[in-house]
């Protein structure tokens, strides 16, 4: 139950940051896409089996796409792919802060690249790649770095607190 609460916190942070930094579809300004939901999935990847986690990632992507962009199918597919990568990586990492930061930035970059590729091919969005790199991806990666540290801190506080208290009550 607490894991769903942690995912809800990530959705709330994403919606709050998207309200503060609105998306400019014309790319006349720099865009920032918060990635706290992706980071929450990375942190929660170790707690679930593969198929269970992939279904969570897919449903999370559908909800994310529906709430924020109105395009739930493609975000479900994107989150499914990113969730698969996060689950595979979760097998091999030792969960240090540096690994979380590097993997979080990698997953956010992979998500943004998948969004760019899918929407360019399927939706026929004609955005030059250099414009997309400079106006969107750069700021997204730069500003998500402190968010990764915040999400790790929240996971330590929320998830570890729950684990300690559930251990005490089970004794």
Image (tube, helix red, strand yellow):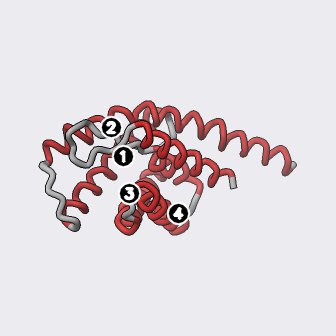
Mark 2 touches mark 1? (CB < 8 Å): yes
**As drawn, 120 above or below 138:** below
Q: Around disc 2, counting alpha carbons within 10 Å, would you say few (fewer than 14), some (14 to 19), or many (20 or more)?
A: many
C-alpha separation, residue under disc 3 versus residue under disc 2? 20 Å
C-alpha separation, residue under disc 4 versus residue under disc 2? 24 Å
The residue that disc 2 covers is 141
C-alpha separation, residue under disc 2 versus residue under disc 1? 7 Å
Depth check, mark 1 against mark 3: the one in front is 3
Give the mark, 1 or 3, whose residue is nearer the N terminus: 3
The quarter of the displayed image where residue 157 is located: top right
Q: Nearer the viewer, residue 106 or 18?
A: 18
Which disc number belongs to residue 56?
4
Position of the N terminus by quadrant: bottom right
In the rendering, at what x and y percent does residue 132 appear? 19, 45
Q: Around disc 4, counting alpha carbons within 10 Å, would you say few (fewer than 14), some (14 to 19), or many (20 or more)?
A: some
User: Is label 2 in a helix, a strand or a loop?
Assistant: helix
**As drawn, 147 above or below 27:** above
C-alpha separation, residue under disc 3 versus residue under disc 4? 19 Å
The residue that disc 1 covers is 108
Mark 3 touches mark 2? (CB < 8 Å): no
Give the mark, 1 or 4, whose residue is nearer the N terminus: 4
Q: Nearer the viewer, residue 107 or 171?
A: 107
Give the mark, 2 or 1, whose residue is nearer the N terminus: 1
Residue at 44%, 30% (x, y): give it: 146
In the rendering, at what x and y percent does residue 108 appear? 36, 46
Which disc number belongs to residue 122?
none
Q: Nearer the viewer, residue 34 or 150?
A: 34
Mark 4 touches mark 2? (CB < 8 Å): no
The residue that disc 3 covers is 69
């Amino acid at each position: 139950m607490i894991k769903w609460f942690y995912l809800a916190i990530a959705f709330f942070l994403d919606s709050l940051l998207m309200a503060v930094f609105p998306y400019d579809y014309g790319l006349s300004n720099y865009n920032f896409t918060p990635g706290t939901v992706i980071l929450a999935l990375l942190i929660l990847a170790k707690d679930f089996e593969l198929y269970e986690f992939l279904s969570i990632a897919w449903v999370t992507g559908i909800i994310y796409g529906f709430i924020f962009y109105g395009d739930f199918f493609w975000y479900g597919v994107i989150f499914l792919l990113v969730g698969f990568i996060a689950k595979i990586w979760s097998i091999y990492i030792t969960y240090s802060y540096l690994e979380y930061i590097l993997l979080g930035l990698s997953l956010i970059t992979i998500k943004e690249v998948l969004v760019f590729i899918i929407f360019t091919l399927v939706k026929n969005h004609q955005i030059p790649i250099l414009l997309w790199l400079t106006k969107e991806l750069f700021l997204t990666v730069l500003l998500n770095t402190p968010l990764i540290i915040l999400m790790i801190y929240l996971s330590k506080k929320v998830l570890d607190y729950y684990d300690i208290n559930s251990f005490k009550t089970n004794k």
